[in-house]
Amino acid sequence: MSYIQIEICANSFESAKAAQLAGANRIELCTELSVGGLTPSLGLIEKVVSELNIPAHVLIRPRSGNFTYSSSEFDVMLRDIAFCKELGCEGIVSGFLSSENKIDFEKTKQLIAASEGMEFTFHRAFDWVENPLEELQNLIDLKVNRLLSSGQKPTAIEGISLLKELQDIAKGEIEIMPGGGINLENASKFKEAGFKSIHLSATIKKQVLPKKPKVSMHSDAFFEEGIVATSSAEIIQKIKALLA
């Protein structure tokens, strides 16, 4: 019987510990599942690596909005990768797209070079590219270990036909790992399709507030896809002048 590996998208130390206790094969450590995942804090990475034994692959994504980053954001990504390497993390999960939603070959190449000694998974930024079959070859040329994708659909089960096509084309040169909406009801479908691993969060929701707070700390304005919020020097200067 073929064996399929389970990667858990762990958004906290508790999630990472649960993955280890349940016998998962590895974790993708991140935060903020609501926006597709962001780089976890250095403290969280260090705690997971030092206190748990499960292989940790760390998501390197400095913000939500898109996958095209500024030079300063790219520098942050490289610094985070260096920290992960220093700690002895097993892998890095990242990616970089051009403004036309094509894989930025050179930037991704630099991310891979910085990750030397660790596995490199190209994440679901792939689900935004226009020509997935062509871009798969770019990832093969870059010697990426693994591609995480939902098959360019909201869930992997909806995108399973493209995922199977990608797997057939890859011929083992890169692992295709389905991820997105995988659960108890559909997980076996990916084993039947011959995939070597699947990616899921297996989350349950827990209410931690006894009642709704008077003031919400969530803002819908920041959750719109493609919106990136940054502080404005001009506004800061105007307020400073107003208060002088």
Image (tube, rainbow, N blue to C red):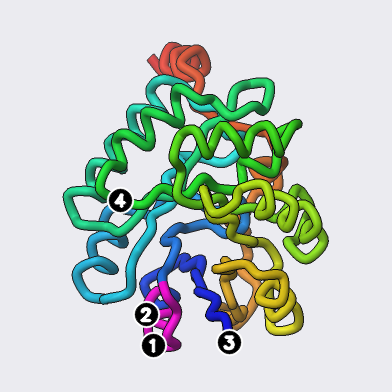
**Lower position in the chain sequence, tag 4 or tag 2:** 2
x, y percent for residue 184: 69, 84
x, y percent for residue 35: 61, 51
What is the secondary structure assignment of the residue under circle 2?
Answer: helix
Q: Nearer the viewer, residue 217 or 23?
A: 23
Does 72 sit left or right of 116 as displayed?
Answer: right
| Magenta stretch encompasses residue 18 | yes
**Lower position in the chain sequence, tag 3 or tag 2:** 3
Q: Nearer the viewer, residue 228 or 185?
A: 185
Q: Which residue is mark 3?
A: 1
> Which amino acid, mark 3?
Met
Which label lies toward us, 3 or 2? 3
Q: Are marks 4 and 1 in contact (CB under 8 Å)?
A: no
Chain part drawn in magenta = 16-25
Q: How many labels, in total?
A: 4
What is the secondary structure assignment of the residue under circle 3?
Answer: loop
Q: Which residue is mark 2?
A: 17
Question: Which quadrant: the C terminus?
Answer: top left
**Lower position in the chain sequence, tag 3 or tag 1:** 3
Q: Are marks 1 and 2 in contact (CB under 8 Å)?
A: yes
Q: Are marks 3 and 1 in contact (CB under 8 Å)?
A: no
> Which amino acid, mark 2?
Lys
- Between the residue at mark 3 and the residue at mark 2, the CA separation in whole angstroms equals 28 Å
Q: Which mark is residue 118?
A: 4
Q: Which residue is mark 1?
A: 21
Q: Residue at x 57, y 71 (%)?
A: 201
- Between the residue at mark 4 and the residue at mark 2, the CA separation in whole angstroms equals 21 Å
Reply above or below: 172 against 50: above
What is the secondary structure assignment of the residue under circle 1?
Answer: helix
Which label lies toward us, 4 or 2? 4
Reply above or below: 241 against 176: above
